[in-house]
Each structure stands twice: as structure tokens, then as C-alpha cells.
Amino acid sequence: MERVLTLLSFGPEGWGDDIAAGVVVTVSLALATLPLGLVIGFLIALGKRSSDRYLRLAANIYTTLFRGLPELLTLFLVFYGVQIGLQRLLHLFDPTANIEVNAFVAGMVALGAVFSSYASEVFLAAFRAIPQGQYEGSIAVGLSSLQTMRLIILPQLVRLALPGLSNLWLILLKDTALVSVIGLADILRQSGIAARVTKEAFLFFGIACLIYLVLAMLSSIVLNAIERWTERSGVSR
Amino acid sequence: MSAEQTLTVDRPPVEKPRWTHQRTIGVVLLCVWAALALAVLVFMVDAWDPAIFQRYLPRYLSGLWITVKLVVVSVLLGALLSIPIAYGRTSRNGIVSAIAYAYVYFFRGTPLLAQTFLVYYGLGSFRPELQAVGLWTFFREAWYCAVFAFTLNTAAYQAEILRGAIESVRRGQWEAAAALGLSKLQTIRKIIIPQAMIVALRPYGNEIILMIKGSAIVAIITIYDLMGETRRAYSQTFDFQTYIWAAVIYLAMVEVLRNLVDWIERRITRHLKR
């Protein structure tokens, strides 16, 4: 027991500080991906409900692509593919140039692409749940289409899309574990290093799982609070 | 206004299809997709090497087979395991339902990768104990560890699907079946399951798709599934088209499955369409 406590302490003997650093990396990656994924997902959803055939097609290709590929493969495609692509592009101008893609940015882009393709479906379903009368009503009171979106549709959309988006956030939090494979020092990588050095694999991977559980619980509490807050403005039934 | 006057009024001109902003954006985006597809195609043709193709085609096929085997085995075993868990979740016994809830919460709340590591590396900590009960030969193999971890994981998700689907069938169906004198097993088999399956089909399809995508991570614990073969091919050739081939195969698998689920759903809900 004492040995376990020493191993988990924050001192030079323990791995507590390393794992805490991993938690910071995981949480900041998830938090950095969230706005990116939300914005792109919203734009894709707008594209999907456009009256124009070509725009719908372009948006659907995006979803099919990133929903169908394994997250790990997307990560590798971004990490290596973008690197190679940029390298080739750069060599056109400067044959000696060398470029390296940051693992954090690669993770953000890959997870953001996956998140946004799922988020666009959530937004789309939420859009469909808003009655046509809301649009007609806002035209009748003379709002422009941008005002309609901002003042009438978006507030309702947030409420309708929140349960689906909460789910996606929990999935995103779990998916961040994949970036440990491309060398980002997140929870899983740090506990993996600790496991290899101390030969206490079960302890450290168990701790990693528990940390993910705690993060999920904390997110649930926050998300529930947000949900209650948005429901204030809902129609009381 | 007389009748002649109304007759002379021209019909409004037919509105010509206008070139809208949305169409501009759509065309531009499609051009971007086309350019990307073209770039990938040019890259593939440029890097095309029959020797590499000949050498790696059988390996990719064997990797694909491993992936399919892993997904099929763990989804089937998970389906079996999910029945008692779903039963536990709906149980009125507080302790049983708490255990089932904790199980589901743990496996749905932690990353599959961490669970796989916990089984593959973590259980090595208990080597003497496992050897004593004769399970070490099982947990020594990466393949069995992966199947074990994936089964536990998918069982948690499938238990929730099963529970949701069975609870979606109205109470009256149970009562009517009881009134007709059907036994509990008959009720479940003939009344509840057919109705619950309509609700459960899509979530089950999604779960299988998630498993196909999730199975890529077993490459990290040294199993040569499709992803593992891809990583090996890339590390040997430094040829990026290895990843593109894998992407195409995974996409094809997922799309086929998705369309299959759509088709089955259309068929089994024919009686609900008006």
C-alpha cells in the first residue's frame, strides 16, 4: 500500500505529477478541439440543409468520409499525410525546406474532423425539430435571414442539440486517448511510461481508466447544469 | 374589371433558376473535393509499383480477415454477455442493478484503448495468480486479450441497446400476452423481440460500425489486423499510399454495412409505412 502511495505521489519518486501533466494535455486537447468541431459541424449542417444540390453533396461527402474512417486512421492520415503534402508543396518553392506537423495540432485537426461530421448530424436533426412556423413568423415581423438565425433559430437549436452534443463531447474525451500513439504526452502515454518503468502496469492503466471516468463524471455534471440552464427558456409542457 | 381585361393580363414569367450564392459555395467545395481526389489519384499512380502491390495484397487480405474475425467474434460474444447485463440493469434488486450499472458506466466511460492496455499489459501484473488458475496461456496472447477487451466493451454498449429496445415495447404487450396465456419465454420470443428488434436494428448497426472502426487500435498491441498490416507496410516502404489503401477498404466496409442496415430497416418496417 505504501509503495502504491509512493508511486502515485507528486515527488521525484512518484508519477503523480507526470500523470497530472497528462491530464492537462488531454483536457486541453479536448477543449481546443471542441470549438473547432462545433463551428465546422454547424457549417456542414447548414450545407446539408441547403436548397442547392451541389452544396448538399459536398457536405455529405465530408460526413461520409470522416464517419466511415477509423479515428486512428484519420489521425495517421492527418499526421503523416499533411506532413507529406506540405513537404511536397514546400519543395516546389524551396527544395531544402523541412516541415514537421505538431502532434497536438494533428490531433486537433483529426479529432475535430471526426467530431464535426457527427456534430453536423446532431445539428441537422435539431434543425428539423424547429417548426417551419418559426421561420415564417420571423419573416412576418421583418427580420433578415441573419437575424432570424441569430435571434430565433440558434437559441432553440442549442437547446435541441445539447443532448446529442453532450454525448459527442464524452466520445471526444475518450478519443483523445488515441493521440498517445503519435507521441503526445496525454494521460494514457504518461501512465504507459510509468507502467513500463515501474512494472506496475495494472495499477497505472487502472489509474488512467479511473481518471477518464472522473473526467466523464465531471463533464456530466457540467453538461447537466448547462442543460437545465437552457431548459429555462423552453416551452413548459 | 371585365372578363376581357383579366384575359389580357400576362402570366408572370417563369422564374429562371438563379445562380445563388449557395450554388457558388457548393461548386467551389465540390471542386476542392475533386482536386483532392485528383491529387490522391495522381499520387497513387505516381507511386504505383506492381512489386509492392503483389507483395502486400495478400498481407492486406489477411489483415482484413483478422479485422473481420475480431469484430464478428467480439460482437457475438458481447451479444451473449449483454443479455445478463441488460437483465441486471432492469432488475429490481438494488445490488444487482448497481453492479450492472457500474459495469456499463465503466466500459462506456473509458477509452477502448485504455481498456485494451489494461487487459493486455495490466493483467501481466497478475502473472503468478493467472498461472495458478491456468488462465495465463489465454491472457499471454495479444489476440485473446483483444477479443476479451472488445467483448467486455461491446457487451456494455449492447446491453444498453437491448435494454432501451425492450423498454420501448409497451407494457400492454406483456399484459396482452399474459392474458392470452403465453409463457414468459414465449412472450419474449414471439411478442417482444420482433418489436424490439425494429428499434434496436439501427443502434446495433452503429455499434458494429463502431467496432470495425475501433478494431483499428489492436494494431498497437501487435496484432496484424488491417491497420497493423498497414502500419507494417508503411514502416517498410515509407510509401503513403499504404494508408490510402487502408482508408479505402475501411470506408468500403462501413458504407456497405450502413447501406445493408438501411435496406434491412426498410424491409422490416414495411408494415409501418402508410
Image (tube, rainbow, N blue to C red):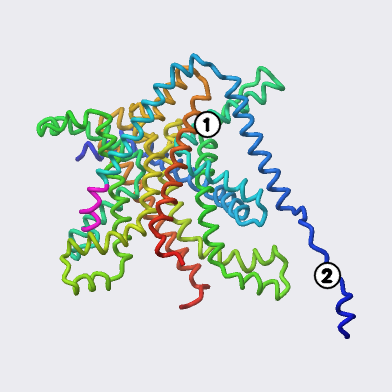
Q: Residue at x 52, y 39 (%)?
A: A110
Subunit bearing disc 2: B
Q: Label 1, label 2: how many angstroms apart (C-alpha)?
A: 60 Å
Q: Nearer the viewer, residue B167 or A94?
A: B167
Q: Nearer the viewer, residue B179 or B6?
A: B6
The dominant secondary structure in magenta is helix
Up the image or down, B243 lies above or below A176; here it is: above
Position of residue A78 in the picture relative to residue B269 (left or right): right
User: Label 2: which residue?
Assistant: B11
Q: Nearer the viewer, residue B181 or A3?
A: B181
Task: State the residue lying farthest toward the top.
Answer: B51
Q: Residue at x 51, y 64 (%)?
A: A160
Answer whether residue A9 is visible to the viewer in this image: no
Amino acid marked by disc 1: Phe
Amino acid marked by disc 2: Arg
- Do callouts 1 and 2 mark residues in contact (Cβ within 8 Å)? no
- To the question of a shared chain for discs 1 and 2, the answer is no
Q: Residue at x 36, y 58 (%)?
A: B198
* Residue A131 image label: none
Subunit bearing disc 1: A
User: Label 1: which residue?
Assistant: A79
Quadrant position of residue B166: bottom left
